[in-house]
Each structure stands twice: as C-alpha cells, then as structure tokens.
Image: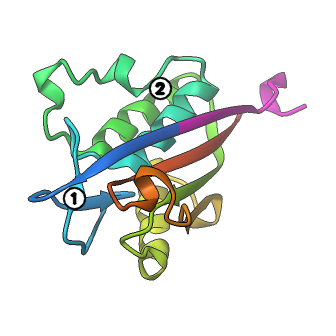
Amino acid sequence: MHKKGLTPRIGFGYDVHAFVEGRPCILGGVEIPHTKGLLGHSDADALLHAITDAILGALALGDIGTHFPDSDPAWKDADSKDLLRSVMMMVRKKGWDIGNVDATVVTEEPKLNPWLEKIRTSIADVLECSVDQISVKATTQEKMGFVGESKGLAVHAVALLTA
C-alpha cells in the first residue's frame, strides 16, 4: 500500500498528427528542426498530447479533447505545455504525483535521438518531476503506412500516478 492507501494508477495515451508545410515541428515542448511541422488546432505537440491523455486516463477524467476541445477558439495555437500544466493541477488537486512517464514517438523523420535528452528535460520541467521519471524513445514504422511514408507521426505514452 502507498500513502493514503491508494493503489498507483496507470493511464495510456495515443496521438497522431499529419505533417504540413509552414508550421514548426514541436515535440515534448521542444522545436525540432525539420522541413515540416505538425497539423493541429493547438501547436500540435503530439508527444505532449499523448502524455496528457495518459495522465487524464489514469485519473479517469476523459481525454484531451474533453478538456481542451478543438471547437473552442481559446485553444487555437495553444502551447501544449500549458495544457499539460492544467492537467497537472488536476493531478495535484486530487492528491496524486507522477510516478513515471514512458513514451514512444513513431516517425521516419525527423530523427529524434539528438533531441531526446532536451525533450525529457522539457517534459520533466512541465510535470515538475525528475528527468529520471521521464522516458522518451523514438522508433520508425519500417516505411509502412502513413508514418512509414513520412506523412505524419504517432505517439504512444503511459503514465503512472502515485499517491
């Protein structure tokens, strides 16, 4: 048992965005040099969106679209770090802390290995936790499907909350 007698909670998040010309490529709150950016209502940070969904899932509070709908002009071009900070306020209000986050970005390009430590640090800053609690990996889809054809990218994320 953990403090308060609560069992840790796990949530899963997934997000996908298409690549488009004329937008920055932002992942984990870090602008990644690339010829294309991600299409979306907010800044389209698919990594932070998947993490946000994972945390909301662990809290059983729906998904990112429930809290920050793309039909609401208030979220147009929103910084996804701000959305995640709002969700972290919910986490703290309910008495939870981040145990750890594990995410995988699936993309043929851009190559993310040179940026992974900066991305981990950015996410840890937003979540107010240690960088050792944040894992971000990158893989390809072996040239298969829309990701493999470099039309977009996908992100899978898991978050563990502890009391």
Q: Amino acid at mark 1?
A: Gly
**Front-most of 99 and 54?**
54
Q: Quarter-wise, where is residue 20 in the image?
A: bottom left
Q: Quarter-wise, where is residue 69 in the image?
A: top left
Label disc, if present, on residue 90 of the rendered structure: 2
Q: Per the image, is 39 magenta? A: no
Residue 28, given in percent of the width and then of the height, sits at 39, 57
Q: Per the image, is 7 magenta? A: yes
Which residue does the image show at 29% across and 48% down from the upper left? 18
Instruction: Tell me if residue 36 comes above or below residue 157 in the rendering.
Output: below
Quadrant in the picture for the C terminus: top right
Q: Which residue is mark 1?
A: 37
Tell me how far mark 2 sits from mark 1, CA to CA. Answer: 30 Å
**Front-most of 49 and 160?**
49
7 relative position to 81: left or right: right
**Front-most of 24 and 127?**
24
Q: Amino acid at mark 2?
A: Met
Instruction: Tell me if residue 115 comes above or below residue 106 in the rendering.
Output: below
Mark 1 lies on a secondary structure that is strand
Region rendered in magenta: 1-13
Label 2 vs label 1, nearer the camera: 1
